[in-house]
Amino acid sequence: MRYAMLIDTLKCVGCSDCVVACQTENDVPMGYCRDWITEVVNGQYPNLDLELKSERCNHCDNAPCVRCCPTGASHKSTGGIILVTANECIGCGACIESCPYDARYQHPEGYVDKCTFCHHRLEKGQLPACVSVCPTNCMYFGDLDNPNSEVSQLLNNRKHKTLAPEAGTKPQVYYLL
Amino acid sequence: MEELFTSGRNIPNIDPYLQIWHWPISVYLFLGGLAAGILFFAAIITILGKDKEYPTAVKKASIIAPIALVIGLLALFYDLTHKIYFWRLYTTVRIESPMSWGAWVLMFITPLSMLWVFSYYSEIFPKWGLKYDFLKKFEKFLIANRKYMAYALIPLTLILGVYTGILLSAFNARPLWNNAILGPLFLVSGLSTGAASIILLSKTKKEKHLFGKIDLGLIIIELALIVHMIMGFYAGSEVQLEAIQLLIGGDFTVLFFGFVVILGLLIPAIMELIELIGYKLPAMIPAILVIIGGLIFRFVMVEAGQLTRYLY
Ligand code: SF4
Ligand code: SF4
């Protein structure tokens, strides 16, 4: 199994529903977030090109955060989800330094926290909170090892990109263009 | 023209730029390098059988090593945010993680450095003789095995010295750190601060002279490595070009060139050279400059590195 998330940049309107849904679902402390919205504006007025997208941990296949963790708290779980075990984490910050996407933060309680692809919801057969609330249905979630899954089909048929592929992390959050 | 906005994100210590590692990490890297340098020279001189000729290197200076290591470890501990799980460092060995093997090397080298100093206890503190018999026996045992300790120290100190650089260079997410020279560079800088502390403590001309020469050689290597590092950045990708701007024409230029390169390397090198030719100069000054320069170098790299990142 290889979980992946696809986000359609042509459909995303940057409403931040996914951000709020995540904060509520995962009890993210005030002032923190596990996902966020970026807007990229290209070109010169009046010929502008705007790209909106929701970003989060990319659950990298080649995850530097897992490699540099001295205790094994950061690890790869079923389906390639990258998780942090809070009571193994010493809060050394190495993983935060290692993430090219700045997707991690120090929880006020001291351990390191980030997006989990809502693995607790996946276990119950539900979709991640962000995916399930998106009002434009711009997010897709599924198994890339299954060639018939919606995500595999979409990646076959649509142009897509990942963030900073030059960092060598093999991100598993794909952006449809 | 491209503009990037991130909305709704202002996470403490992450935005707008990373502030995860603070001054204790710089201090930790500096003290680790210093201890590695001091112990390396103590071990080499013992193996060469010159410990009578260069007493400061093996005795007095080596007292600094365990103290530096313990303070360094405390500094590291201080910067952890989930401290009660500190022991987790020592329930696993993770070869891929520099933080992990660094912690293990320190686990070996810190007690070894204490044993080393203890083996000189009676010579360092002749007035306060050891009270108990078993302590005296233990000291005798350590004295008899000093050479073996020295053999163990050589690889351990070299690993420790390189580790202080690799801890940073292993992160490809921070382009300023991500250069392979940083390991050797921090090792040489650590050896140089070690030599400088020996000069500071030494009372004999012969010893000062030898370590002045060694230090001069190390500074020259260090300067060459810095040039090499800068060249490497200029031959690099855009993120690396941007990263080196911080040192070459940015917020850290004055600290880097003024305090590290000029005051911490060039001036001490010139002073040591003048001394070598035969003029009298207080050997203290270059030694102190080298030590301060080494400390500032760690600060510059730790702070500046966290400002550099991939932009996507
Ligand atoms: S995005 Fe960052 S935190 Fe997530 S897996 Fe990749 S490197 Fe690790
Ligand atoms: S902060 Fe925690 S999860 Fe991150 S590298 Fe350190 S121990 Fe591992």
Image (cartoon, grey):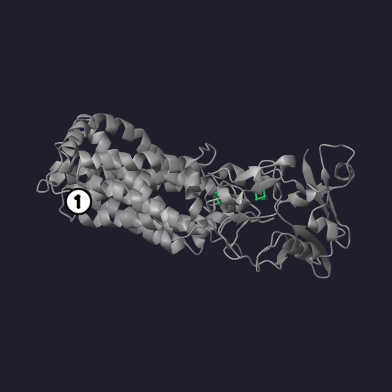
Q: Ligand 2 closer than 8 Å to the CB at disc 1?
A: no
In the image, taking residue B125 as reference, residue B81 lies left or right, namely right
Residue visible at 59% across and 66% down in the picture: B12
Residue visible at 74% across and 64% down in the picture: A24
Chain letter of mark 1 equals: B
Residue closest to the eye, A2 or A90 = A90
Residue closest to the eye, B270 or A86 = A86
Residue visible at 58% across and 49% down in the picture: A98
In the image, taking residue A38 as reference, residue B58 lies left or right, namely left
In the image, residue A137 sits, relative to residue B146, either above or below, namely below
Residue visible at 39% across and 51% down in the picture: B73
The reply to whether residue B262 is visible in this rendering is yes
The reply to whether residue A161 is visible in this rendering is no
Residue closest to the eye, A174 or B72 = B72
- The quadrant of the rendering that contains the N terminus of chain B is bottom right
In the image, taking residue B1 as reference, residue B191 lies left or right, namely left
Where disc 1 sits, the SS reads helix
Residue type at tag 1: Leu
Q: Position of residue B218 (x, y in %)?
A: 32, 43
Q: Position of residue A11 (x, y in %)?
A: 87, 59
Query: Which residue ends up furthest to the bottom in the rendered image?
Result: A46
Q: Where is residue A76 in the image (x, y as percent from the top left)?
A: 67, 42
Please state the total of marks drawn on the protein image.
1
- The quadrant of the rendering that contains the C terminus of chain B is bottom right
Q: Crowding near pointer 1: few (<14 within 10 Å), some, many (20+)?
A: some
Query: Pointer 1: what residue?
Result: B201
